[in-house]
Amino acid sequence: MTQSDPVIEWLLDSDPAIRWQVMRDLLDAPQPQWMAERARVETEGWGARLLSFQDADGQWGGAAFLPADFDPREWRERGQPWTATTYSLSQLREFGLDPSSERARRTVALVGANARWEEGGQPFWQGEVEECINGRTVADGAYFGIDVSLIVDRLTGERLDDGGWNCERINGSRRSSFASTINVLEGLLEYEKSTCGTPESREARSTGEEFLLERNLFRRLGTGEPADEQFLRFLHPNRWRYDILRALDYFRASALLSAAAPDPRLGEAIGHLRSRRLEDGTWPLDWSTEGRVWFEIDDGPGEPSRWITLRAMRVLRWWDVRSI
């Protein structure tokens, strides 16, 4: 795989948030080169644009989960808004804002001082009550260097008997969901990257992975039928939602951390991913969530997506090399 590949050239003809990941994950560029490109996320393109919407107190939209001007009718009529602090931080993590930068350090400190969860008024970095939210908060906090160990301890104690998580547990659910589980797994993986984790968090991550693997990432355990056809359609940004590409990208990152070989039970999802590649070598965006955003970062459903293509190519590259 070289820069002369037209798909690689198309990916590089993009935003720094994508370019640095192409350089690292697809071109094996030396670390100083992709780190220099990554540093541009703060000052150019989508990263700089998202940072420009930040409030003086470090938040986005004046609140933690829903923008301060939110009216419940908006959710019913337009969909969930994505402009408040929690989703903005997650997007900066996806873009790759350097967590060691002064801007990142100042941001997470201000968020810690000023953001409060609407659910109970607790400080942002103490987490909320819902597993999906807490999983993303752990991922963001660990990435940006915050001590989120108390939320991790809570999440490890909230596993269900089948090994995963469900944000409806508090309402009586006893069966894990794919979406809740991937949100928590991503958080625990980021925590393990930054701290090596704890025996409890590593064991919880293992059982969560097994929940997905024994279902081939998308099937019901009892019937073998797809749990949700949407899991096979590619989405970006994922926000809290699940699809098999998100799961495959997680398992890639997990295996790279431990130097493990790909689990064969990922094979069916890999086959589906290959089948969705377009003739020009790209992958399309199948759908995106409704609701208010700061700005669009894809060309729309049905169009080739640089984000989907980047993730698909690095997953397949990992699978094809490691599975030999």
Image: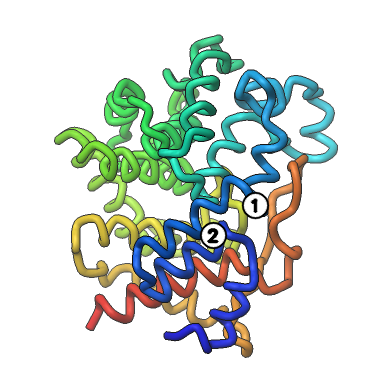
The answer to whether residue 175 is visible is no
Residue 136 at x, y percent in the picture: 47, 37
Residue that label 1 marks: 44
- Mark 1 or 2, closer to the camera: 1
Image quadrant containing the N terminus: bottom left
The colour scheme used here is: rainbow
Look at 39% across and 45% down and name the residue there: 186
Look at 37% across and 64% down and name the residue there: 216
Type of amino acid at the residue the image marks with label 1 = Glu
Residue 184 at x, y percent in the picture: 39, 39
Mark 2: secondary structure? helix
Quadrant of the rendered image containing residue 31: bottom left
Residue 265 at x, y percent in the picture: 30, 68
Crowding at mark 2 (Cα within 10 Å: few <14, some 14-19, many 20+): many
Residue placed most toward the observer, 310 or 200: 310
Residue placed most toward the observer, 258 or 101: 101
Residue that label 2 marks: 231
Mark 1: secondary structure? loop
**Who comes first in sequence, dot 1 or dot 2?**
1
The answer to whether residue 46 is above or below residue 28 is above
Give the left or right position of residue 267, taking residue 113 as reference: left
Type of amino acid at the residue the image marks with label 2 = Phe
The answer to whether residue 301 is above or below residue 227 is below
